[in-house]
Amino acid sequence: MRYTIMLSALLCFAMTAHAEQVFMTPQAYIQAQFDGATPKPKVIWLNQGLKAKMAEILNHDYAGLRVRYWQGEGEQAFKTVWILNEIGKEKHITVGIAINKQRIEEVKVLVFRESRGWEVKHDFFTRQFKQLFLGDENRLNKSIDSITGATLSVRAVEKLARIALVLDKEVQD
Amino acid sequence: MLQMSRSKLRKAHRSVAVFSVAVLMFTAISGFLLQHAEDFGWQHQTIEQGWLLDIYDVKEAQPTVYQVVNQSEAYAVQLGHQWYINTQAIAAEDKLKGAVLLHSLWVMVGERNLYLYTESLELVEVIALDLDGTVQAVGLLGDALILKTHTSTYQADASLISFAKINVSSDAVAFSRAATLPDKYATQLPRRVSDIHYLKVLQDLHGGRLFGLPHWVIPDLTALAMLFLSISGLMMRSKRIIP
């Protein structure tokens, strides 16, 4: 009985509409990261090694052969901004990640399309990423606290942060 | 139920149990499959069977077809949500506005996104377009990709990375035009396509939303049967213990 009630409750949640929530447009995020002066986008082509690293982090192949990013100039030459997407449970979550000198400056959930797990949009979650960098085996140097009921979204955001750091390292080296 | 004798209670318990076997098995099996649907990849596979498409009232789709610029034998097609190059399905989520073949890349353009594919149809990049409106047409000006919105015309750089406004006469641009799909391709495409996944079918099957009222009643019957069997079982036990 308990199984039926729990399953019914879960299904009710699962059936709720998947509304797209745009917290900030990618363009506005990029502009904000470079004090209003959006640099021209650049792309990094993914070689076999990079694709393998990304697949290891994502647990699936990355769909695409190149990734777009924005890099500052002058004093901001070590800063890159990445707009990346990953599926939480069923739909893509779009995340903006700013990296400066190979440390995460900011992670922000820009567009959330899942029906559950939206808690990852909150600052209390995203500020955990501040100043983190790549540790061993392309993992973050500190673990990220999960959120009950939003495990898959948390994992997706964490994966994207690691991907951004890997790609940033590649373009800075 | 409280006043029933133990034998009557046992008879009712047994009758409900026998009656419930099919309903409970159906709920348990569909629940188990739902729990493991992702292991089977059912959240990605869309339904194709005619009878399932009938249940979801999926109508025959009218294809939107554009001639691919620079490749006279190629057509970009949208059928429902699905995009194709001739008959080869490709991943895209937008309203198709045209296509060109440029530097060995298929450039498929929707209202808000641009999809780059290699000649072997491997995805290169999905570019979310940041223009002053939705794309209305796509074409080539020499070797440059041109995107046209209601109010402006944009030219992409050679690497298809950024887009800049230009002033150019529409007559100078070879636009991807609406076309009729040749029969040799049209006959190979499905007549009905749907973006409904098997996971959704399973959710509907388990939740009683697939076959009208009789199906809708099944989850209720399951819950009532389990409730009755639990209570009657406890009562039978208590009647046995207390003389």
Image (tube, coloured by chain):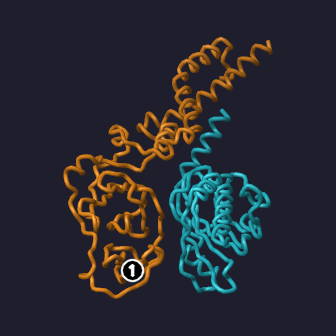
Looking at the picture, which amino acid does disc 1 mark?
Answer: Gln
Residue B8 position, x and y percent, is 63, 14
Q: Identify the residue at horizontal 57%, vertical 82% (top origin).
A: A39
On screen, residue A170 above or below A35: above
On screen, residue A124 above or below A2: below
Residue B26 position, x and y percent, is 52, 28
Task: Identify the element where label 1 is drawn.
Answer: strand
Camera-side residue of B152 and B233: B152
Q: Identify the residue at horizontal 26%, vertical 82% (top origin).
A: B172
In the image, which lettered chain appears cyan? A
Colour chosen for chain B: orange
Which image quadrant is residue B170 in? bottom left
Residue B120 position, x and y percent, is 39, 55
Viewport quadrant of the N terminus of chain B: top right
Which image quadrant is residue B243 in? top right
Q: Is residue A171 visible?
A: yes
Q: Identify the residue at horizontal 37%, vertical 39% (top origin).
A: B52
On screen, residue B243 above or below A110: above
Camera-side residue of A115 and B149: B149
